Image (cartoon, rainbow, N blue to C red):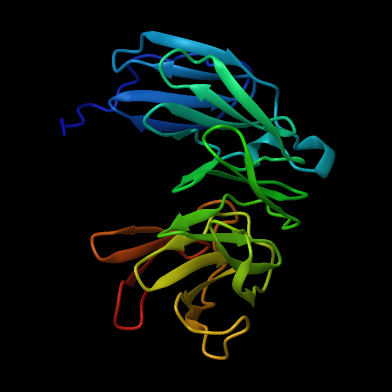
Amino acid sequence: MAALAGGAVLDTYRLGGELTYGVTVAGGDLYARSSTTCVRLAPDGTERWRQSLEPLVYDEYNLGDETATQVAPAVTADAVYVPDRDALVKLDRETGSERWRVAVDTPYAASVADDGGVIQTGWQETVAAGPDGSVRWRRDLHSRAAAAVDAGDVYVIDSDLHELDGETGETNWQVHLPSEGTAAPVVTDDSVVVASDDVRAFRRETGGLFGPDRTRWENTTGAVSAYASPVVAAGHLFVASSRGLQTFRVGDGGA
């Protein structure tokens, strides 16, 4: 990775509308969803394509666009998935052309690619679609946070954390949270970590719908950022909170 020198702003790109909702880097190119468009940029800033989209629905739920901090496009080998107003949209990765759209009631979190296609959470439902636009399943799980996926499991936050079967959408287990989460959960080999007022890590493999030994640990020492997911790196878990950036060791009582 090249060194960062000086910190000077090299250029500013207008992506349409007033706000950029999220950015993904894949294959050296940058994919960004703004309030009115999805854009693919080359490393030198050259615009490869641009596809118009509708603003996501925030104002109807007393939310400002500033809450859209994690709506980065989901990029796969041949597709770019983004939420549009009341829809999940698949764009061709090379051309930006719309391939299909699937109705989803009020999505305003990022789409997430999984083994079977893509998962889109919404204020009124969660929908799983295949690469061809077929609906694999729908669930009445109302989520303001993006899903997390790993090894065929799908994790969705409403007032509870649900682990879903990726093929059927059925709940394998669930556990109650202290408040509705707005940041996507983070999955490690053994745990799923949720930042929702406090930080909690849950065991992935404890049996039963409401397993009695689901909680691995919890930390309530500081209110966490409402819209920032934890990050796992270098053997540690990093969480933004009112006390600053908190760090937990992965393993030995950590995640």
Q: Nearer the viewer, residue 151 or 187?
A: 151
Q: In the figure, residue 62 lies in which quadrant?
A: top right
Could you say where residue 99 lies in the image, as x and y percent from the top left?
57, 21
- Asked if residue 137 is positioned above or below residue 171 in the image, the reply reads above
Extreme-bottom residue of the structure: 212
Whether residue 234 sits left or right of residue 100 in the image: it is left
Q: Nearer the viewer, residue 187 or 241?
A: 187
Residue at (51% x, 52% y) in the render: 228
Quadrant of the rendering where the C terminus is positioned = bottom left
Could you say where residue 19 lies in the image, as x and y percent from the top left?
60, 26
Could you say where residue 200 lies in the image, as x and y percent from the top left?
51, 74
Extreme-left residue of the structure: 2
- Asked if residue 166 is positioned above or below residue 136 in the image, the reply reads below
Residue at (46% x, 27% y) in the render: 79
Q: In the figure, residue 86 lies in which quadrant?
A: top right
Quadrant of the rendering where the N terminus is positioned = top left
Residue at (42% x, 63% y) in the render: 187
- Asked if residue 54 is positioned above or below residue 67 in the image, the reply reads above
Q: Please state the total of marks drawn on the protein image.
A: 0
Residue at (54% x, 77% y) in the render: 220
Could you say where residue 91 lies in the image, as x and y percent from the top left?
53, 22
Q: Nearer the viewer, residue 5 or 20?
A: 20
Q: Which of 17 and 87 is in front in this view?
A: 87
- Asked if residue 123 is positioned above or below residue 190 in the image, the reply reads above
Extreme-right residue of the structure: 60
